[in-house]
Image (spheres, grey):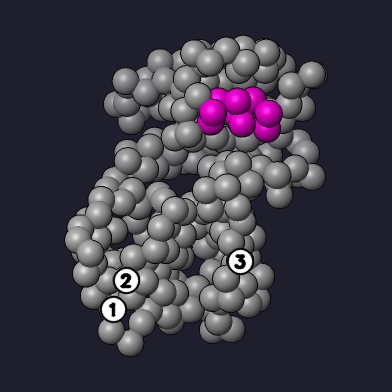
Amino acid sequence: MLSILICDDDKNIVEQVTNLLENIKSYENLEFNIETQNSGDFSLDINAVYDIAILDIEMGDISGLQVAENLKKNNPETIVIILTSYFDYLDNAMKISVFRYLSKPIDEKRFCRNFTEAVEHYKNISKNIAIETDDGISRVKTKDILYIENLKYGSTVVTKTATYKTNKKPFEWEKLINQPTCFVFSHKSFLVNLQNVINVDKTVITFQAENELVTVACVSRRHYTQLKNEFMAFVGGNN
């Protein structure tokens, strides 16, 4: 069963989000446990493990971003949704792979939509694919893929920790992976995974790899506007 955390120093927000989640649980026929906190001190406990964490940013001594980092040390798969009135932290939020960054006051319809997307994302992040190369077959989590680059024969699959030269083309990988909200084309030759993108400009994308940032010139003029919209929708859940 999913374990959900709500952490906000505003008790009214905690109550509102709790009620929204209870409604979602009923309407969507989902099963999950809800735990609430009003400060981030609890996150220092190595046993604090959650599947989805809904966090405020400004909470006294320990910020929501620090709480997110602490939780991800305990469980790297934790999906983080930020609720805040402050948008100065967006760059830092992306560096720790925040799933959604939502503004206060809470737009209830948008929140509910993004939470159900987080649940669906939870189901997908453990998805594995088999990548066959000349050296053998490797099992790779789709969430660890940074991008797939087209080659004359096949493509290169670049992950956080390794690179694989394969016989499949990017459009074949797109169909096989089947995660259209995450994997999009930034160029006719590049299929990128938005889960690991922290910045997009008109020519390059910056990815968060294992312990470093990777910048790749992989954006075409033709794809830029659509890519920007898809990235913003993925990051912020825009309408």
Outermost residue toward the front?
Answer: 135
Amino acid bearing label 2: Lys
Residue at x 54% of width, y 34% of height: 80
In the image, is residue 106 part of the stretch drawn in magenta?
no
Bin the neighbour count of mark 2 within 10 Å (Cα to Cα): few under 14, some 14-19, many 20 and up: some
Residue position marked by numbered label 1 in the rendering: 154
Amino acid bearing label 3: Thr
Amino acid bearing label 1: Gly
Read off the magenta span: 65-73
Image quadrant in which you'd find residue 179? bottom left
For the image, the number of numbered tags is 3
Can you give x and y, in whole percent of width and height, for residue 174 in the image? 31, 66
- Identify the element where label 3 is drawn: strand
Among numbered discs 2 and 1, the one appearing first in the sequence: 1
Q: Is residue 166 above or below residue 56?
A: below
- Is 11 in front, or is 65? 65
Can you give x and y, in whole percent of width and height, for residue 69 in the image? 61, 31
Residue position marked by numbered label 3 in the rendering: 215
Among numbered discs 3 and 1, the one appearing first in the sequence: 1
Q: Main secondary structure of the magenta part?
A: helix
Residue position marked by numbered label 2 in the rendering: 165
